[in-house]
Every structure is written in structure tokens, then in C-alpha cells.
Amino acid sequence: MRARWVPMALLLAGCSSGAPPAAPAAPSPAASPAASPAPQVTRPADVAAAPRPAPTRRPPALPDALQLQFTVLVDGCLTRGWTLCHELGTHYLDATGTTLDVDLDPVLARTPALVTRLRSALSARHPDTGWLPWDFTGDTDAHFAFGHAWVRTVARPTAGGWLVRTFLDDTYDFDAGAAFGSFGRLVDEGRAAEFRVHGASSTRLRSVPDPGP
């Protein structure tokens, strides 16, 4: 029997990437189509979305009630098979603040609405969607891992079609004043650290620019 689940909205409420990333220029076609590289993007240096640094002082030796509550919720993610939610929450508590890279392939496969949105902005005439806002919703791993994030698909012409790749940019944080914003106090006390999340899908060869899995 499935145990009664504690609401997880707090993880969504805290995960926000602030202002939209600055959109770099659309990629130029490779000089030699046969040697076209996999699509890449320059990650935005967005001050408004940058994680605030964790204090340099050592955190208290024993966890407090807020830290224990967050730990229970993160462990609950793993119980439900939500590996992204668990990985990001655990990384928040390790207080290193280092950027975390995630695989977008399973996210795209489980979020058809996102694929539809990216597909509507992508074409041979417009092979770069630019950074688009996206709210992951529903009772899903991505919903509790990212909440609101920025996504982008880039396509490059190559021999036999197009090389297509999708990217995600997010800051894992808890905004003061927002619902469950008290989890930001873990950063102030040196018990956790905000961090950037960089996501990327595998590169796919398509006959037309298409971000589908």
C-alpha cells in the first residue's frame, strides 16, 4: 500500500531561474556540412538568476528541524522514483554550490507538451528557438526538480539532415517571501547552497529540425 505522501510543492516553489537568460545569436551553418559539430549554446551569465554564495562559516554540527524536514522530502522523491528531484535536492544539501549537469533525454520523453512548444518555435528558417520560459507541471519528477526553467533547441544543417539538441538552464533556489521560502534559510546558515542546473539532450540527426525524443 502506498504511504500517504507529504505535499512536495515546496520544491517547485523554490526552484526559479529569475530573469530570462540573454539569447545568443542563432548558430551559423557549418562551413563543411559533413563536419558539422553537435549544437552547443553559450550559457547565459544572468546576474539576476545567479545563485547567491553560501556563507563561509561552518554549519552547526547537528541538523535542525528545517534541514531534517527537507531531507525527508528529498528522500521521498527517491521513494517515488523521482531521481532528478532527489539528485537536485541532495546537491542543495551538500552545500558545494557547484553547477549540476543533467540529461534532458528522459525529461523530453516524459514532457510531450514541452516538445510541442519547442517544435512550434523551430524550423529550417528559424533553427534556434532562443531561450524560452517553461513551467514543468503535474505530479512529475521534472515538476519538483525544476519548477520554472529556461529551455532552448538549436539545429544545425549537416549531411543528410539536421543535428538537433535541446538545452535547459535553471537556478535551484528558494525565494524569500515565496511559499516555502524558509528553505532558503538553509543557505544563510551554511547548511545548503544554491546552484545552477545545466541540462542538455543527446544530439539527434533529423530530416527536418525537430526536438522530439
Image (cartoon, rainbow, N blue to C red):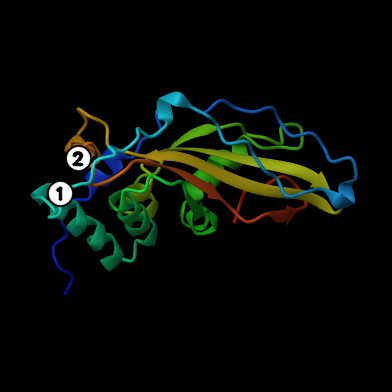
Amino acid type indicated by mark 2: Glu
x 64%, y 39%: residue: 41
Q: Position of residue 159 (x, y in %)?
A: 87, 52
Figure check: 48 above or below 33: above
Figure check: 115 above or below 128: below
The numbered disc on residue 60 is 1
Q: Position of residue 199 (x, y in %)?
A: 52, 48
Q: Are marks 1 and 2 in contact (CB under 8 Å)?
A: yes
Viewport quadrant of the C terminus: bottom right
Drawn side of residue 157 relative to residue 168, left or right? right
Drawn side of residue 213 relative to residue 32, left or right? left
Q: Position of residue 136 (x, y in %)?
A: 39, 44
Q: CA distance from mark 1 to mark 2?
A: 8 Å
Disc 2 packing (10 Å; few <14; some 14–19; many ≥20): some
Nearer the observer, 60 or 118: 60
Viewport quadrant of the N terminus: bottom left
Q: Quadrant of residue 189?
A: top left
x 60%, y 37%: residue: 120
Q: Earlier in the sequence, mark 1 or mark 2?
A: 1
Amino acid type indicated by mark 1: Pro
Q: Quadrant of residue 5?
A: bottom left
Q: Disc 1 vs disc 2: which is toward the camera?
A: 1
The numbered disc on residue 189 is 2
Indicate the secondary structure of the residue bearing disc 1: loop
From this viewpoint, is residue 19 visible? Answer: no
Indicate the secondary structure of the residue bearing disc 2: loop
Figure check: 48 above or below 67: above
Drawn side of residue 154 relative to residue 81, left or right? right
x 52%, y 43%: residue: 168
